[in-house]
Amino acid sequence: MQSTAWLALIPFLAICLGVGGLGAIVTEKGVRTWYPTLRKPPGTLPQWVFGPVWTTLYVLMAVSAWLVWRDYRWGARAALFIFLAQLALNVAWSGIFFRARRPGFALFEILISGWRYSSPSSSSIPSMQSRRACCFRICCG
């Protein structure tokens, strides 16, 4: 692999981690004031877990999207566009759930976005035979 190919990973990381940071800004007040007051089922993870887990997920999504772009370039344009739409929906969910405090509407958003955007992103990749494409499908929907 060319050493310059790694440079293309930087924008993918910047976009994904930027979206994660935006989501953190959107959720900050709700996480501190509203979320602790909700009744949660047993086994709910402690709040401190979410930051490291989401950061890891966003890094994995960036690497997966970069691998697909690296292998398919503009042939993966549709899949990468849908991937960006999914990132936007992630931030929207955070705003709906934590800022607007509308869990029911947030659930509806997950169901609609999962139905609308999950299948097309992976099926938009020219050949799902590639391990990289499969990784993209797992990480990014």
Image (cartoon, rainbow, N blue to C red):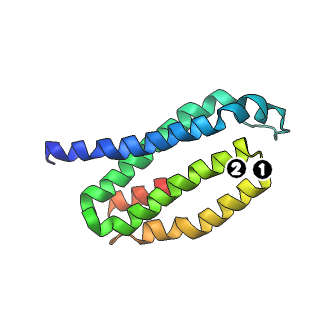
Where 111 falls versus 139 (above or below)? below
Q: Amino acid at mark 1?
A: Arg
Q: Residue at x 50, y 36 (%)?
A: 55
Mark 2 / mark 1, whichever is N-terminal: 2
> Residue 115, which numbered label?
none
Residue 36 placement (x, y as % from top left): 79, 31
Q: What is the secondary structure assignment of the residue under circle 1?
A: loop
- Locate residue 73 relative to residue 141 in the image: left or right: left
Q: Residue at x 51, y 52 (%)?
A: 87
Q: Which residue is mark 1?
A: 102
Q: CA distance from mark 2 to mark 1?
A: 6 Å
Q: Badge 2, how many Cα within 10 Å: few under 14, some, many 20+?
A: many
In this view of the protein, which residue sits in the foreground, 131 or 75?
75
Q: Is residue 45 visible?
A: no
Residue 132 placement (x, y as % from top left): 34, 57
Q: Residue at x 72, y 35 (%)?
A: 30
- Locate residue 26 relative to residue 7 in the image: left or right: right
Q: Amino acid at mark 2?
A: Ile
Location of residue 40 by image quarter: top right
CB contact under 8 Å: marks 2 and 1: yes
Outermost residue on the left side: it is: 2
Q: Which residue is mark 2?
A: 96
Location of residue 6 by image quarter: top left
Residue 68 placement (x, y as % from top left): 32, 58
Where 20 falls versus 73 (above or below)? above
Q: Residue at x 75, y 57 (%)?
A: 105
Q: Is residue 94 visible?
A: yes
Q: What is the secondary structure assignment of the residue under circle 2?
A: helix
Residue 7 placement (x, y as % from top left): 23, 42
How many numbered callouts?
Answer: 2
Q: Badge 1, how many Cα within 10 Å: few under 14, some, many 20+?
A: few
